[in-house]
Image (spheres, rainbow, N blue to C red):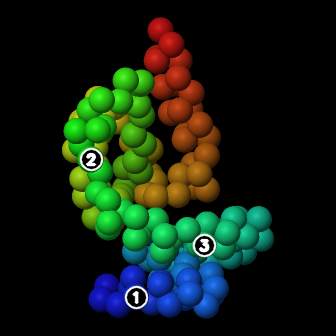
Amino acid sequence: PAGTWEAIEEATRVGDWDEVLARFLPVAEISEDEIAWMRSDPPTWDAALDGARTVDRENRALRACPADLETLRRVAVPSLVLRGAETTSPLFLDGLDDVAAALGATVERIEGQRHIATVGAPGALAAAIRQFIVRSRA
């Protein structure tokens, strides 16, 4: 929504990490129920607050330096792109197919997830990574 990044920049400037998350998490398709659950679990919320410190910087970096597909085509190691099967936000999807193709990456979808499978489906996330490593070694 209009004004979101400006509000995140201001909240970052004053160190209001709760406000950064209040603005960013809905854009990242984190539902109100998921946010409430995150807030109810102190270690999860503390980790989210810690991560909020990088949101503005990461956004600025992505806007200033979009993916260089020619550079990615030169990556010579097996690559894995994980995405939540329920992700619809252009924030995460715009250009993802181009990046995956440039890398020659394996693309795996985590069913029932959007952006935070580390919280919502850590077992499925770990299994996808483990399977990729095993297949890459074969």
- Residue 130 visible? The answer is yes
Q: Secondary structure at mark 2?
A: loop
**What's the residue type where badge 1 is placed?**
Glu
In this rendering, which labeled residue sits more in front, label 1 or label 2? 2
Measuring from the top left, give residue 66's x and y in whole percent.
29, 57
Can you identify the residue that label 1 sits on? 6
The answer to whether mark 2 and mark 3 are in CB contact below 8 A is: no
Among the two numbered marks 1 and 3 on one chain, the one whose residue lies closer to the N terminus: 1
Residue under label 2: 68
Instruction: Specify which label sits upstream in the sequence, 1 or 2.
Output: 1
Q: Position of residue 95 (x, y in %)?
A: 24, 53
In terms of sequence position, does the residue under pointer 2 or pointer 3 come before the other? 3
Q: How far apart in space, not on screen, are marks 2 and 3 (Cα)?
A: 25 Å
In which quarter of the view is residue 89 placed?
bottom left
Using the image, determine if residue 97 lies above or below residue 61.
above
Residue 116, horizontal then vertical, whole percent: 52, 57
Residue beneath disc 3 = 53
